[in-house]
Amino acid sequence: MKKFSANWIFDGVSPPMENGILLLSDSGEVLDLSVDDGQFEEVKHHEGIIVPGFVNTHCHLELSHLKGLLPQGKGLIDFIEPIISLRKNDLPHIASAISKAEEEMVNNGIVAVGDICNKADSFELKSSENLKYHNFIEVISLDPSKAMAVYNAGIDLYDRSKEMGIPASIVPHAPYTASAELLRLIAGKSEEYGSPISIHLNESAQEDELFRKGTGSIAEFYSNAGVSLDYFNPSGKSALETVLDTLKGQSPLLLVHNTYLNEEVLAKAIKLRDNLYWCLCPNANLYIEKRIPDLDLFLKMEQNITIGTDSLASNGSLSVLEELKTISSRYPAISLSTLIQWATINGAKLLGFDDVLGSFEKGKCPGVNLLKEVDLSNLAITSDTKVIPLA
């Protein structure tokens, strides 16, 4: 049996426990969590706060080899344009970068990942089960005539993922790269298996301009690439409303980034669909657009929030803790208990891993992280806080 104690223990679902003791089996299963009353011997006490293993709900392991190669702070389109040519790299280099990225996540206390996949480059490593993964198999085409072809290609990748023991979903990339026909196919697959869907949303103000007016930098991006949008008819609504009009169902839907989301559209989205989750990737948002979402909107409407790191192409590290630091520095009123909930149990629920991960409830094997160099007087993380995986 393993025994862990700290100044405070945050279990992911209940109020924090002072001077708690966490009991695990040798295999990592939670046996009990209670106040340390001295009845147990050989208890290792840690200075800091113990929390469950982190869940990273949005990552792109495939892009790990692009670290430092993409422009910073110039906006979404200037970030996206070079990716197509830069991804044409040799597989050994990509595989090595993916392996190093996973090792970084393990060292940063991450135990589960929702990972965007356009290829099978990461599947072999994931099948080793160093971390739990859910593969979001991304399919892309705004052209309705190509919907079935790209969907079927996604199904081939989906089947391969499942054959290798890795849970998976077929998902769209973003509103501006998914036709209504493609969204309907994706929704049908998701409802059939109850699997979560992920979609990039409102990374740029230009998304809404495209769907409201058919103009803006995204329309220009297609034109500059020699792609005609003759088939595209603006809905006159926001990008999110347009997507939710078609992407119907009850399966969990993860909306990633939300950098330019406003209160009016958020309120409409909540009415249009249940089981919404909102993924925050603040460090990637700062890298690309030099801003982060208005979190007061989500707090006001009591929404399910999760944390993502995005990729090393848009982030200096794959660390959930670093994302929490960025949030805490800009929104200090958000309690550490809330931040830990976002970083653990909410993500576990979204990915369907909450039966084993996300909290210190009996019978789970959630992993154990120690947060050191924290502000214990105010129960807050600081710029100096570090994470150490204990189990």
Image: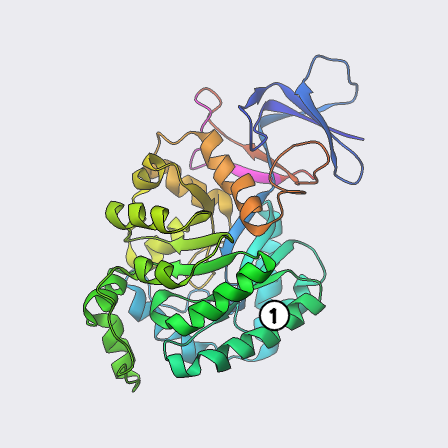
Q: Residue at x 42, y 29 (%)?
A: 335
Q: Report which residue position mark 1 lands on.
A: 158
Q: Residue at x 77, y 14 (%)?
A: 39
The range drawn in magenta is 378-388
Q: Residue at x 62, y 57 (%)?
A: 133
Q: Is residue 148 magenta?
A: no
User: How many tags in the picture?
Assistant: 1
Give the residue type that dot 1 points to: Tyr
Q: Quadrant of residue 222?
A: bottom left
Residue 297 percent across, percent down from the top left: 30, 40
388 w.r.t. 57: above or below: above
Q: Quadrant of the C terminus?
A: top right
Q: Could you say which is closer to the camera, residue 60 or residue 347?
A: 347
Q: Residue at x 55, y 65 (%)?
A: 189
Whether residue 143 is visible, yes or no, is yes
Residue 200 percent across, percent down from the top left: 40, 60
Kind of element beneath mark 1: helix
Q: Quadrant of residue 201?
A: bottom left
Residue 87 percent across, percent down from the top left: 47, 76
Q: Quadrant of the N terminus?
A: top right
Residue 3 percent across, percent down from the top left: 74, 27
Name the image colouring: rainbow
Magenta-colored segment: predominant secondary structure: loop
Task: Tell me: 277 left or right of 205.
Answer: right
